[in-house]
Image (cartoon, helix red, strand yellow):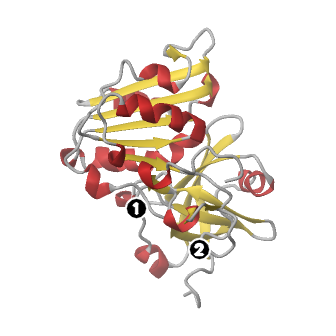
Amino acid sequence: MRSHPDLPLAARVVGRVQETRDIFSLRLALLDATERAGYRSVPGQYNMLYLFGVGEVPISIVSDPDDGGPLEHTIRAVGRVTHGLERLRVGDTLGLRGPYGRGWPLDAARGSDVIVVTGGLGCAPVISMVRHMLRHRETFGFITLLQGVKHAEDLIWRRQYQTWAALPDVQVLLASDQGGMQWPHAMGNVTTLLDQARIPADGIAMLCGPERMMKAVIPLLTDRGMDPFRIWLSIERNMQCGIGHCGHCQVGPHFICQDGPVFRYPDIADWIDREGF
């Protein structure tokens, strides 16, 4: 048992998938049975993954909290810690703190149509919410999923998208800036998909990915009648502590690690895609 709630717990890698050349997924199980039974998260939250002697990084939880299985995290190897995590194999251990932050607005989404717009690996923070909505299908309305990537090979979870697209009352639209000869979907960025998408004027939107992309999508949604207060964004910053102490993730009056990473658009509108924030 931890002496302090923000000390890392020991977790074991119980599954690993190499999604692309530099993207991989880890399935983690807490070693302590009591901590494992008491762990609770909501879609959109993240954990701090700690590699002993190297450091720690914030990583979104992509598994549905109601799944009851290991905690799944999808990671791009881009720095010292993530390259170290990439070298882990089944049976290895690491530290885990969390869950942290504010997740997606489950209460606001219940009974509503939902449109999800993501770009690149920015899809990771919404995957747990999509899985949750599909697990509780009767609770949510029509679900529209838009995913854009820069290169076709960056599209992970292809079979998952195919499975989702075959479900009733689910629309899946995919786009790539660079598709290649075998790319069967749209060419261009994710905004090119909005003309084909079912956009619910009285529904709710969840956006995740590069801030410039999200900033471009928002007026395209509001022009079609969506209420800005029903548009939610997941914001990414340099979150080094997860508990609002270090200040690295402060944006204006907000600490992304605690006040976010999910924000209602009007609450963060003045701060997204601004240099120096």
Determine the CA span between mark 2 and mark 1.
17 Å
**Residue at numbered disc 1:** 42
6 left or right, relative to 45? right
Find the residue positioned furthest to the bottom. Answer: 3
Residue at 35 percent of width and 24 percent of height: 197
Q: Is residue 39 left or right of residue 111?
A: right
Q: Quadrant of the N terminus?
A: bottom right
Marks 2, 1: nearer the viewer: 2
- Image coordinates for residue 275, horizontal then vertical, percent: 70, 46
Query: Which image quadrant for residue 58?
Result: bottom right
Whichever of labels 2 and 1 marks the residue nearer the N terminus, that label is 1
Q: Secondary structure at mark 2?
A: loop
Disc tally is 2
The quarter of the picture where residue 11 lies is: bottom right
Q: Secondary structure at mark 1?
A: loop
Residue bearing the label numbered 2? 243
- The residue lying at 71 percent from left, 39 percent from top is 22
Q: Quadrant of the C terminus?
A: bottom right
Residue at image position (73%, 46%) is: 77
Q: What's the amino acid at mark 2?
A: Ile
Using a 10 Å C-alpha cutoff, classify the residue at mark 2 as few (fewer than 14 neighbours), some (14 to 19) or many (20 or more).
Answer: some
Residue 79 image offset from top left, x and y in percent: 78, 51
Characterize the local packing of mark 1: few (<14), some (14-19) or many (20 or more) Cα atoms within 10 angstroms.
many
Which residue is at the front of the view, 129 or 193? 193
Task: Give x and y (percent) for residue 228.
Answer: 36, 43
What residue type is disc 1 on?
A: Val
Checking the image for residue 182, the label placed there is none
Left or right placement of residue 183 versus residue 90 in this view: left
Residue 91 appearing in the image = no
